[in-house]
Image: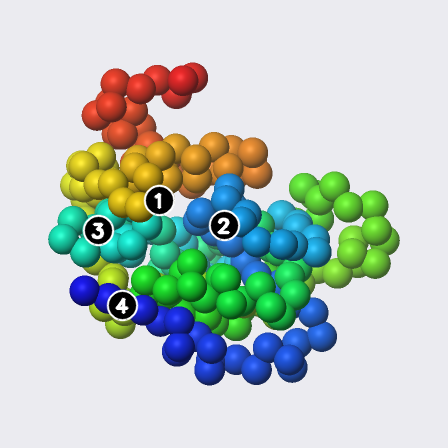
Amino acid sequence: MSFDTTNQNKSRQNLESFDEIWVFGYGSLIYKVDFPILEKRPASIRGWQRRFWQGSHDHRGTPEAPGRVVTLVEKEDAVCAGIAYRVSHDVFEHLDHREKNGYLRYEIDIDFDQNNDASNDASHKALNSITGLVYIGLESSEAFLGPASEPSIAAQIHQSIGPSGRNDEYVFRLAEGLRQLNEEDEHVFAIEKLLFELTGRSSNS
């Protein structure tokens, strides 16, 4: 079973048309930066919320027993915080492969967090938003698992493991990354709490 979107993504945008390219990370891209970056900044996007509704058949699960990872779901007035990375064009050879399991690249307006920005560059302080790229697994994606109760999501995550490791470790690392951004995400933290109970792991471990 494969939901490989690599070739689709290569034809979705003309990357050369961007003077500079920013990629918005809201899931594992927050804590696992395995690609070269030119700059990173705390940022957010409007009208989207983070949900564990995307299947992971290749990283945190298997085709026979997929895990669950986050995608973005549209919601009016929602704000999703994350990190924006300024990257070079050639990075997408890697990113398209990494995000190939049902994720497609979309253009999106990225708002930079001026209050949580360590940059002393005045030109960057003046830059409030920019059009960038984000990977989203929409409901139309074959890898999309859809909504479920938080206990059901936690139970599936607790049982899942794939080539990149245990699915629950993904949740713990994402939750920690969000705390470092001073972000309160009720959905992620609720799943994390349930996993603490299932694993017998404490929040301090």
Give the percent coordinates (x, y) of residue 204. Answer: 43, 17
Q: Earlier in the sequence, mark 1 or mark 2?
A: 2
- In the drawing, what numbered circle is on residue 29? 2
Measured Cα–Cα span from mark 2 to mark 3: 20 Å
Q: Earlier in the sequence, mark 1 or mark 4?
A: 4
Q: Earlier in the sequence, mark 2 or mark 3?
A: 2
Seen in the picture, residue 93 relative to 155 is either above or below; the reply is below
Seen in the picture, residue 90 relative to 190 is either above or below; the reply is below
Q: Earlier in the sequence, mark 2 or mark 4?
A: 4
Say which residue label 1 marks.
164
Q: Residues within 10 Å of mark 1 (few under 14, many from 20)?
A: few
Q: Secondary structure at mark 1?
A: loop
Under mark 3, the amino acid is Thr
Q: Nearer the viewer, mark 1 or mark 2?
A: 1
Q: Earlier in the sequence, mark 1 or mark 3?
A: 3
Say which residue label 4 marks.
3
- In the drawing, what numbered circle is on residue 62? 3
Residue positioned 46% across, 82% down in the render? 11
Q: How many marks?
A: 4
